[in-house]
Image (cartoon, helix red, strand yellow):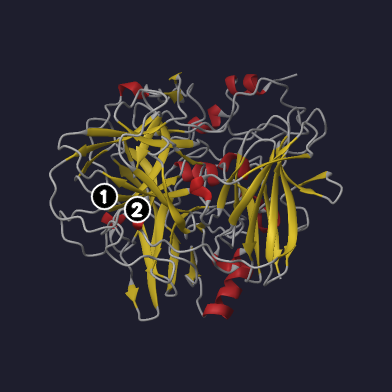
């Protein structure tokens, strides 16, 4: 029987990729076109940190801000000067080419002031022809599938032989992660749309299954219409002050697109759950700021990447499976490997350096990796493990805004843990530290000396160098901040039990997928579900609901569980035995999880319980935010009605 490895070596897939014009579609380190850079050959801490500017609005009204944000292909100096530039996908203002960047500029607004963003797919060349995807797109999984036409879009195609990777045009849809919105503005995976390109092949679906019905909803609810190649999302911002983020969410393509840089911050300020100006470090960037202004509230997008020697991104289209591959009548997915890069980037550059004054700083951190978990500390010695926190550090916020109490990490040398898509809000106090001192942000989980687990590359993230103070710091010490209390969600009126499952040898045992969500019934039995199965979880509008996320025993480790629509409060975690039954052994949330969250760590062989209020009638999804898992079916719809 032919194996997957034999097919790849035989060139069935790689040969097809090599024939494609434009940016190279990379399938693995064996690509003849480029060799992967040894990350230890990339100089560290030679590039200043890029401070993400504010995205300029197109209209400022008394009741709302309006933005146009396009997705384009750009060349960016991600590696240090002297290395080739890297072709990435970025977001920016279509009327100002200089605003395009990966990650995108920060969108900002105030609580209870509406934001309208027209998201524009401009992945076309100068002649108006569509550009191929930067990273390999697997056409055998459940994905957007434009070549299938309207009847085959958002489906799992079948083939009688190994197909080549998809070569475009590239769909787009943007999800505002953490937003309290209706379904038509949420960026659900089947709401994608192609660019308004002149050469889209006849018969291709130009929009996803949900695009047209949601376009009608947006017109009826908000009076907005969507032009070809665009979608206008309306965000009421009727939620707490918080650090949200936006990212690509196309069905079956999220892992590839996030890796190309399609991410950015969205910051909400004001309201009863914010703090008075001057109590926490500021300012942060705003449109029209003068050149050279110093910022003390800095947003940091953390991503790991791997580069080829021509500067291009390396991203494996397949994992190197060694087991049986076909019969040809039953083609399984490519199985994109759980991608972890070999080089750290912050705000779009490798291993940057930031000059800091001897005063307090606020850092808003986002783990935008595909898969990697981070355990973060600021230390003096970047190679020592375990690291020792060298600068007083407090956690003051998480996904959904401020914690009820600042948590001092330095008091117990505790690293803050971040799974993919989680945000952490830190105050770091450099007060009194001598000028010239140097410190490093590290991932304390990385303890090895090779590849994706090397303390000399991905174990280090960025450097801080202390420079002279330029002004008086009037902010409050974090333990004196008047942080807002937790919301009272009221009585729990319903419970939902869902499971996360990683299945081994799934084709030998008749399973259809490797990664699947499921439902736990009243007897504790686990029923597996597919993305296309009927909705099994319906929440009554106006209720507070307890959710239990069961990470079942098996071959899988921890997952990152994300639910759309709400911010929630973690209640506890409980161990499961080898048979997947509760043991009664429980533990409280970690200190940095005591606020409100939209994503949580769901540890292996544990139940994670959280409570959330549901007040919008709409259709949403919950999924694993390890994006390879999400793209391979670990995602389900639910409804609030």
Mark 1 surroundings within 10 Å by alpha-carbon count, few (fewer than 14), some (14 through 19), many (20 or more): many
Q: Quadrant of residue 389?
A: top left
Is the residue 484 above or below the residue 526 in the image? below
> Which residue occupies the foreground of this view, 420 or 338?
420
Q: How many marks?
A: 2
Q: Residue at x 66, y 35 (%)?
A: 604
Q: Position of residue 536 (x, y in %)?
A: 77, 57
The residue that disc 1 covers is: 360
Tags 2 and 1 in contact by the CB under 8 Å rule? Answer: yes
State which quarter of the image contains the C terminus. bottom right
Does 39 appear above or below 271? above
Is disc 1 placed on a helix, strand or loop?
strand
Quarter holding the N terminus is: top right
Label ID, residue 478: 2
Q: Look at the numbered disc 2 and give the secondary structure of its residue.
A: helix
Question: In the shown orientation, is residue 517 left or right of residue 233?
Answer: right
Q: Is residue 233 visible?
A: yes
Instruction: Please tell me which residue is depicted at 69% across the width and 55% down the height of the picture.
Output: 547
């Amino acid at each position: 029987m032919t194996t997957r490895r034999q097919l790849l070596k035989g060139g069935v897939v790689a040969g097809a990729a090599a024939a494609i014009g434009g940016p190279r579609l990379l399938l693995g380190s064996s690509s003849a076109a480029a060799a992967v850079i040894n990350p230890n050959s990339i100089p560290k801490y030679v590039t200043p940190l890029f401070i993400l500017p504010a995205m300029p609005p197109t209209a400022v009204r008394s009741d709302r801000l309006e933005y146009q944000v396009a997705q384009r292909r750009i060349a960016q100096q991600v590696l240090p000067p002297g290395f080739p530039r890297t072709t990435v996908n970025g977001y920016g203002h279509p009327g100002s080419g200089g605003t395009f960047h990966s990650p995108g500029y920060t969108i900002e607004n105030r609580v209870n002031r509406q934001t309208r963003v027209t998201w524009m797919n401009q992945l076309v060349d100068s002649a108006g022809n569509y550009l191929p995807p930067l990273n390999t797109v697997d056409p055998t999984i459940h994905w957007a599938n434009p070549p299938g036409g309207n009847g085959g879009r958002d489906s799992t195609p079948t083939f009688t032989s190994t197909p080549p990777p998809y070569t475009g045009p590239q769909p787009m849809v943007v999800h505002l992660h953490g937003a309290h919105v209706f379904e038509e503005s949420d960026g659900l995976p089947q709401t994608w749309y192609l660019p308004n390109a002149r050469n889209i092949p006849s018969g291709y679906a130009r929009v996803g299954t949900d695009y047209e019905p949601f376009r009608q909803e947006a017109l009826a609810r908000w009076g907005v219409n969507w032009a070809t190649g665009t979608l206008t999302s309306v965000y009421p911002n009727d939620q707490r002050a918080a650090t949200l983020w936006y990212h690509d969410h196309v069905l079956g393509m999220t892992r590839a697109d996030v890796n190309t840089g399609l991410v950015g911050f969205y910051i909400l300020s004001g309201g009863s759950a914010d703090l008075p100006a001057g109590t926490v470090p500021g300012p942060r960037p705003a449109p029209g700021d003068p050149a050279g202004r110093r910022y003390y509230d800095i947003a940091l997008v953390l991503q790991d990447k791997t580069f080829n020697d021509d500067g291009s991104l390396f991203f494996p289209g397949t994992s190197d499976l060694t087991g049986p591959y076909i019969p040809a009548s039953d083609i399984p997915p490519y199985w994109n490997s759980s991608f972890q890069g070999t080089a750290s980037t912050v705000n779009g550059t490798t291993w940057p350096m930031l000059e800091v004054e001897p005063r307090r700083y606020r850092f808003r951190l986002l783990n935008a990796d595909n898969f990697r978990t981070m355990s973060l500390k600021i230390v003096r010695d970047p190679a020592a493990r375990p690291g020792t926190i060298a600068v007083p550090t407090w956690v003051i916020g998480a996904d959904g805004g401020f914690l009820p109490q600042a948590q001092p990490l330095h008091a117990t040398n505790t690293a803050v843990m971040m799974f993919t898509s989680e945000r952490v809000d830190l105050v770091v106090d450099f007060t009194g530290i001598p000028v010239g001192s140097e410190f490093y942000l590290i991932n304390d989980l990385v303890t090895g000396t090779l590849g994706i687990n090397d303390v000399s590359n991905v174990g280090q993230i960025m450097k801080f160098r202390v420079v002279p103070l330029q002004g008086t710091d009037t902010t409050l010490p974090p333990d004196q901040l008047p942080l807002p209390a937790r919301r009272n969600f009221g009585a729990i009126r319903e419970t939902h039990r869902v499971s996360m499952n990683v299945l081994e040898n799934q084709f030998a045992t008749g399973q259809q997928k490797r990664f699947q969500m499921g439902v736990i019934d009243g007897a504790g039995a686990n029923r597996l579900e597919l993305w296309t199965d009927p909705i099994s979880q319906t929440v009554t509008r106006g209720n507070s609901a307890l959710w239990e996320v069961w990470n079942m025993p098996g071959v899988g480790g921890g997952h990152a569980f994300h639910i759309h629509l709400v911010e929630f409060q973690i209640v506890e975690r409980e161990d499961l035995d080898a048979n997947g039954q509760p043991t009664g052994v429980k533990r409280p949330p970690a200190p940095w999880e005591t606020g409100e969250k939209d994503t949580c760590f769901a540890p292996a062989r544990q139940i994670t319980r959280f409570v959330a209020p549901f007040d919008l009638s709409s259709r949403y999804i919950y999924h694993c935010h390890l994006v390879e898992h999400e793209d391979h079916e670990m995602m389900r719809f639910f409804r609030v009605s």
